[in-house]
Amino acid sequence: MKTKITKGGWNAFLNAVLSIFILTLSTHLHAKELNIGTATADITPALPVAVCGQFNLRIAETIETPLTANVLVLESSESNKTLDLAIMVSCDLVGIPNELVKKIRAEVQKQIPGLDGEKIFLNATHTHTAPVLENGPESNFRYPIPKEGVLQVEEYQNFFVQRVADAIIKAWENRSSGSVSWGLSHAAIAYNRRVVYSEKAKKPGQFSNGTAQMYGNTNTPDFMNLEGIEDHDVNMLFFWDSTDKLVAMTINVPCPSQEVEHRLAVNADFWHPVRESLKQRFGPQLCVLGWTGASGDQSPRPMYRKAAEERMLKLRNLSRMEEIARRIVLAVEETYETVKKDRYTDVELAHKVEILPLPMRKVTEKEYLFSKSERDKYKAQIDANPEAAKQVLTSMTWNADVLKRYEIQQKNPDAKLETEVHILRIGDIAICTNQFELFTDYGLRIQARSAALQTFVIQLAGPGTYLPTKKAVNGGGYSAIIQSSPVGPIGGQILVDSTVSIINQLFSGK
Amino acid sequence: MKNLKILIAILIFPSLFVVTNSCKDKKVKKNTTTVVANNSGNLSVGWAQVDITPDKPVLISGQFHARVSEGVMDPVTATVLALESGNGESSEKIFLISCDLVSISDGTRDNAKDNLRSTIREKISRKIPEVSPEKIIINATHTHTAPYCHTASSAKELYGVDLDVMSPAECIQFVSDKISEAAEQAWKNRTLGGISYGLGHAVVGHNRLQVDFSEKSVMYGNTNRKDFSHIEGYEDHSVNLLYTWDNQNNLTGVLINVACPSQVTEGLYQISADFWHDTRVEIRKRLGENIFILPQCSAAGDQSPHIMIGEKAEARMQKMMFPDLKDVGDRTLGLRKDIAVRIADAVTSVLPYMENSINRNPTLKHKLEVVELSRRLIGPEDVIQGNKEAEKWEEEYIQLLKEIQKTPALKEQPKWYTQITIAHTKMRRGKSVKDRYELEKVQSKMPIEVHMLRIGDIVMATNPFEYYLDYGVRIKARSPATQTFLVQLTGSGSYVPTTRSIEGGAYGAVPASTLIGPEGGQELVEKTLEMINDIMEQ
């Protein structure tokens, strides 16, 4: 059951009055209501700080934009009793370590006893200009962060946990009845970044063991095609408070936020100008959650027609990041204008949290031996020159992780990665999360089979790692090779099937 | 609200934009400032548009079965852009003609000399003797609801039954008369002007091939199934735009190049230009009724505007955008209008930056080459399969024909001819495999026309095919031009699939659908790039 609060072509004033009236009326007629709370935490680190996302160590000395964690609390209640809830936090980070989620849940539960901490999930926008979040001795991608003179990882973790927990509590406390709508538009943001070459161009190597190469050159006679499709849908949710003020929106773009990924600076990447533009348009109260759709094989970097794109940037006097923001904001604006009168108050809210055991990708003996030789090569480089660690410690630990996985596999061939997923129904739409850099095809499989009107796939609601398709594994290259992906196509399809099954259960009684 | 997008963008991006005019301003003739006529260039631009809708029932082209037109939903048109650089005999003269047709018959399939392309050229050259036929480039938008223009003198020749329609050959004469008149008008209308170009984006075309876990592809398959693996290939949502201006800096027209054929409502029995009609309406609503719009389809053999995933959500958005429409979703007017808004948004979002980059003296160079491409070789097993198909459908056709002859009243039923014309078309399709097998023994290469047109820093390259999108991306990625406009269907058509598509085996990749395969497709990539490099170096 959902109550639509307005419809038709009233003028703005009458519409607002009518909305309030009907909203009030609906509150009395339907005991169930949707409560909405929002908060934003500034999670910008102190400088200097090691930033995450590239193989080389980068120490950021400047802050170009703040980093934020944006919190949206949704609660379905009846007679002041919580029926179900979701606490969603979008963070300007590269990934979300599981350990930090646990700490945030614990911190929140300390302040709000009885709150189901499992209903909290965090996602990362995948900006590559945000702090390193985990770097322990067991890390599979370890940087040689100096012990002094830079912000330590543990310090940032504590800061982040506290800030996010405080914001969640604030959002929980300020929740009040409101309404929601959803919509779909399009924006050409992502490019598929995996370039496929002819068989004769096949080269062996750490990354290029097949015909595909991430960010390969397309201006060459051996270029055949971009490996997969791009998803230019933009799914959106809009939330209003009881006074008709737009208080939050979620924007689901299947593209990671990594336009300025190489900078030695702190930067929230394209979500920053998106948020700023939308706040100018809708007011400072607006809380914007950036959700990255399935896009492990995508990036915002043009793979061809670069000259034409560059020329248009010059004509518009925009940076590439601003241009991406412009396209997203246009999509939002267009959708908002279309759906703003199609709002609902007592929508169905259901939130399932499941732990899925996904089979680990099998490490072949050849892959094991290759990874071992790579690990040893980088270790030797560091032993010979400790400064080399700044460039290759990540590669060493990245390859060493394959050896660990191989050893686990020897002891337990059916080893599983247990991964948490969140599946929500909000009215006619579904939201599903995963921890991965999930290749686009998986997202499309979920969306194609989902019973929901719109299905929001949120990747990187966890620590990450690529999850390539069979096609990509066959093509090889960084992001599809064994080092990049502890879970492979078999696990990927189980994730799809399980997610679809849960979504469709939530809609089975529709 | 859609046509206010740019205005809204300006409001919400005050710090990002340097904008002098909103799109809405463009509707208004420049009367706020005195514009001095700019006669400094040597480019002349002429436009014309003509209605090519026959006033009698015709065969509608584009499906296996015959369709006799049952009225007109909206007119099919041809738009002519005449460009001349310099004066007199030595000037470069080019005609770009875009037609709301499924293809432009060029004799490739039937060796007919009185095909549509030759007839149009001949008539234009007769009216404008200084224009050589090879300077006339004609493309189809691939609407599947336009008159069948073919050299066949009767419906029976094509479909095996008599139908009371204007014959396909008469359609050639009718359409070519109209287009040659429009060309003459565009030529006479030409005045000093300029061009500017830009790149926008619009999600219009979708790859229409779906692959399952056994790696088999199917066109327009159901994606809502457990064994759906992925969409076979890529999509290109860029929109290449060329704007033309008069010497008062008034916008006169826009050439729009989109990687998607115009076939949303492709199953209709009414004449229609499909989404280009709605796009013209939308753009003229925003920019003025006198703006000319010339549509081109980039390499998009594996693309279509049909929604592959998420139709329900698209339908809901269409319903809210166009509340008066009854039909929304895939294959509806709702989708056509939605696409029109998206393309118009691309046009108007780039427009504010075009007025300051008008080139009144661009390099205008054109070259036509007849390129010989390797045919997709048919093997004996293909012939056996083709013959099997032909026999099966011939039997069906004969059976249905007998039934109709025995019971003439069957012809009283609406669309009585559907099944028998499907059988006849499939019979012909099967037989054509053997014909091709025999032809390839003596002629392994297929000659096609490739036009190369340089206008300043951009280039246009044509092909007569439904050229799969990957080939287009290969060309665009390696082209030295700032923007590369690929124009497909400047001839009779026929799919040119890639290797990955042939492995999938969907319609469009099977031998009966294709005259050229990956080998010839790549030859065309290389030849096109050679010609682009050559013309850009000059």
Image: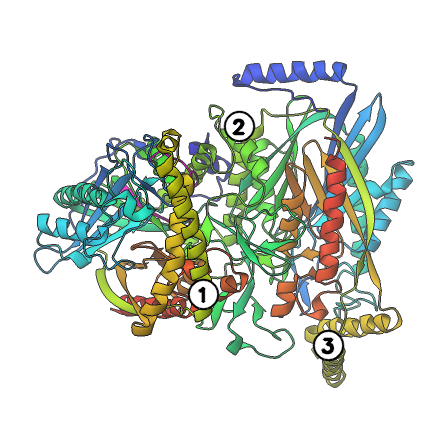
State which mark lies toward you, 1 or 2.
Answer: 1
Looking at the rendering, which quadrant does residue A20 occupy?
top right
Alpha carbon separation for disc pair 3 and 1: 46 Å
Magenta range is B253-271
Instruction: Give residue B384's mark.
Output: 1
Instruction: Bin the neighbour count of mark 3 within 10 Å (Cα to Cα): few under 14, some 14-19, many 20 and up.
Output: some
**Rendered position, A489 above or below B157:** below
Regarding mark 2 in the picture, which secondary structure is present there? Answer: helix
Residue at horizontal 61%, vertical 50%? A254
Instruction: Give residue A367's mark.
Output: 3
Magenta highlight on residue B314 = no
Q: Position of residue A87 (x, y in %)?
A: 77, 39
Regarding mark 3 in the picture, which secondary structure is present there? Answer: helix
Q: Chain of mark 2?
A: B
Amino acid beneath label 2: Met
Quarter the N terminus of chain A occupies? top right
Q: How is the image coloured?
A: rainbow
Magenta highlight on residue B270 = yes
Quarter the C terminus of chain A occupies? top right
Q: Main secondary structure of the magenta part?
A: loop
Q: How many marks?
A: 3
Q: Position of residue A340 (x, y in %)?
A: 58, 27
Residue at horizontal 54%, vertical 43%? A328
Is residue B142 toward the left or the right of residue B33 in the image?
right
Instruction: Bin the neighbour count of mark 2 within 10 Å (Cα to Cα): few under 14, some 14-19, many 20 and up.
Output: some
Q: Residue tagged by mark 2?
A: B320
Amino acid beneath label 1: Ile
Residue at horizontal 79%, vertical 38%? A351
Instruction: Bin the neighbour count of mark 1 within 10 Å (Cα to Cα): few under 14, some 14-19, many 20 and up.
Output: some
Alpha carbon separation for disc pair 3 and 2: 54 Å
- For the residues bearing labels 3 and 1, Cβ distance under 8 angstroms: no
Q: Position of residue B89 (x, y in %)?
A: 8, 58
